[in-house]
Image: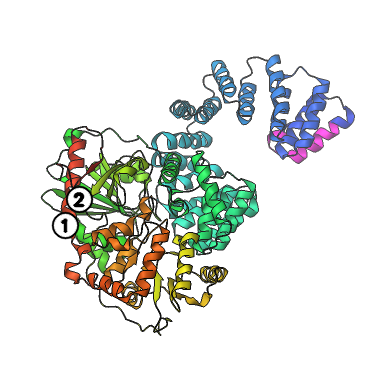
Amino acid sequence: MGNLQQRDFKAAERLLRSILQMDRQNFNALHLLGLNYTKLGNLPQAVAMLREAAAVNDSFAPLHNNLGIALRESGELEAALACYERALALQPAYGEALINRGNVLRQMGRLDDALSCYDRALAINAENASAWNNRGLVLHELGRSGEALLSLDKALILRPAYGEAHFNRGRALEDLRGPQEALASYDEAVRVQPDHVEAWNHRGAALEDLNRPSEALASYDRAIALRPHFAEAVNNRGSALESLFRHQEALESYDLALALDPGKLEVLANRGHVLNYLGRHEEAAQAFARLLEQRPNHPYAMGDKLFSQLQVCDWTDYREQVAAVEAAVLEGRPAATPFSLLAISANARIQKKAAELFASDKYPAKPLLEAFDRAAQAQDRIRLAYVSADFHDHATAHLMVGLFERHDRTVFETWAFSFGPDLASPMRERLKNAFDHFVQVENVGDGEVARMMRECKIDIAVDLKGYTRDSRPGIFAFRPAPVQVSYLGYPGTTGMTSIDYLLADNVVVPATADTCYTECVIRLPGTYQVNSRSPMPAGEMPTRAKAGLPEDAFVFCCFNNSYKITPPVFDAWMRLLHQVERSVLWLLEDSPACSANLRREAGLRGVNGERLIFAPRVRLADHLARHRLADLFLDTLPVNAHTTASDALWSGLPVLTCPGEAFASRVAASLLLALGLPELVAADLQDYGHKALALATRGDLLQALRSRLAFNDAVHPLADVDAFRRPLESAFVAMCRSARQGARPHTFDIASTSEA
């Protein structure tokens, strides 16, 4: 049978067929022909030949083992299992059959029974590398990754160039020690077995986790070159392309992955997210709708669909969808991401529940780093680190740069850990100079960033992103600092057990709302929102005619993002347009679809859609300048104007707000009360309408408000950075002192306790 051993299967088939023509009952020929067909991938013929051989001689254990292999590869798991059991009945110490029986049991989900098979095989031959490898694989699947690693290491001692064992070792290491160590095993797997498709794919995923998307993309491309129809790798390729901001190419990858495997529903979710990023919100909503049709409880899809609709003010079944999302969250289902829920639900307790579900799913605490050495941590100065993607020409940077510059360097040593793009600009240069240490970690994984922060002995780490775009909460899940704080970027609770404190004030988080936040709430005096903007170069002040506004009409405006506009608020706006003759509503233009939907909704409420006027996006200085063309800024609910509110107030434009229950709906009220303008804070939407109508019809009231907002830039109450800094620094000192003493985080009001 030299031809068979040389893998010349066709020649072997001809020879075996000639033998069977002479002797149809020739057991060896039937058995070998069955093996030959198995190797050729002709499984129906293989099974037929091997069963015919068994009819001739049912007492040869290797035959039943080989028939089990063919049946398993055909997907007939129960029949394969019966074959292995017959082989073992004939030859109880048959190690290969025990391993194969374990393999099919693992495939059937009977992991404990599979483990028993591998242990029996090793009792027969402790030098069997395959048994050690498979044992490690099933231990990993049982969640016993530490034991799995020991088994896989044993397999590699016996067979160092064992690609599958290196691959499985990488998977176990991902669970135990993170992607960095896993990557070394995947590298070794593809070195010794360059055609190991799964290893290339997992290697890409590890590189993505390490924030090395270019290398991840190359690894996925290698997997796809080896297996062109590998839908999982094609989907993962889309994720890497997203990380590289190549969104159109990412969409093309997701489309291909769906074509290859229409049942791979997570690709629909990925496709929806990238469509939203591309501003194609209607198509995104359709992708999420299609996903929900096939899997109604797919994580976060209900909220993603509704949030996509809100981006273009498509309020189809709005109330029904809101109720469904809220009910699902209360049942403990991950129906919406925390950020999308801010715009969907006004209920702070539901927002907390959603955040806790999301944090548990995506960012559970990862105790991979050693415990803190409190004695070594107690430096002379407090090492204060701000962590963000926005250390460039970004709204957050404009608000905070003055604070960074003014921190008391006798008390604090300041650090920036920047995982955003390194974009040259005057603001970027100013930010770099504002800190004692500026560390760029854009292409460094979460765990490694956390280790770097540990090595720097950071005392307090402040997350400025939360769950907003480009955020990396995973860094904080590794506990890089003894004190971890959420501030400014995300107006709500993170739900993360690894975030100790939330910086707020008495308005955005009243004392009665403490239980709606997983963090301990630190209340600062005045408003929580720092505002260190410098007077900007004057922008171009357009005429009303140039802006498309009527010269002699009252101009209500709202420059909030379109997803913040909800039907109850829009109803109130349309009532105002009915009541104030010839008035117009000036909105920011997000997309043609959004503008068309809002004009249609106005018509449904009896208002001519042409009374809605849309302002194109322009550079910030020009945007601030054109605020002076409006008469009154109307805020939204359940998500207020935040930076948008301070833009308007800075420009001298009164902002009318209606605070809700949750943080995101109380920010404008915080700013207005800090400015001493309580008359612009409505009790409810009915009061909101009454106040707006009074301001629109009584010029004296509006003029008085404008006069009170006519601050000189140098003394603007929102821009007194030192007045803000001092209590904030007192709060940081109190947090650090408490941690060094081993005390648990606790809520306090910095304005009324000894910590101040």
Q: Position of residue 570 (x, y in %)?
A: 48, 64
Q: Earlier in the sequence, mark 1 or mark 2?
A: 1
Residue 596: name its quadrant. Answer: bottom right
Asked if residue 61 lies in the magenta stretch, the reply is no
Viewport quadrant of the N terminus: top right
Look at the picture and state if 607 lies above or below 6: below
Residue 182: name its quadrant. Answer: top left
Q: Badge 2 is on which residue?
A: 728
Report the side of 114 relative to 383 (left or right): right
Look at the picture and state if 579 lies above or below 36: below
Residue at 47% x, 53% y is 344
Relative depth, front residue between 127 and 415 = 415
Packing grade of label 2 (10 A; few <14, some 14-19, many >=20) is many
Q: Residue furthest right?
A: 22
Residue at 34% x, 57% y is 420
Q: Badge 1 is on which residue?
A: 723
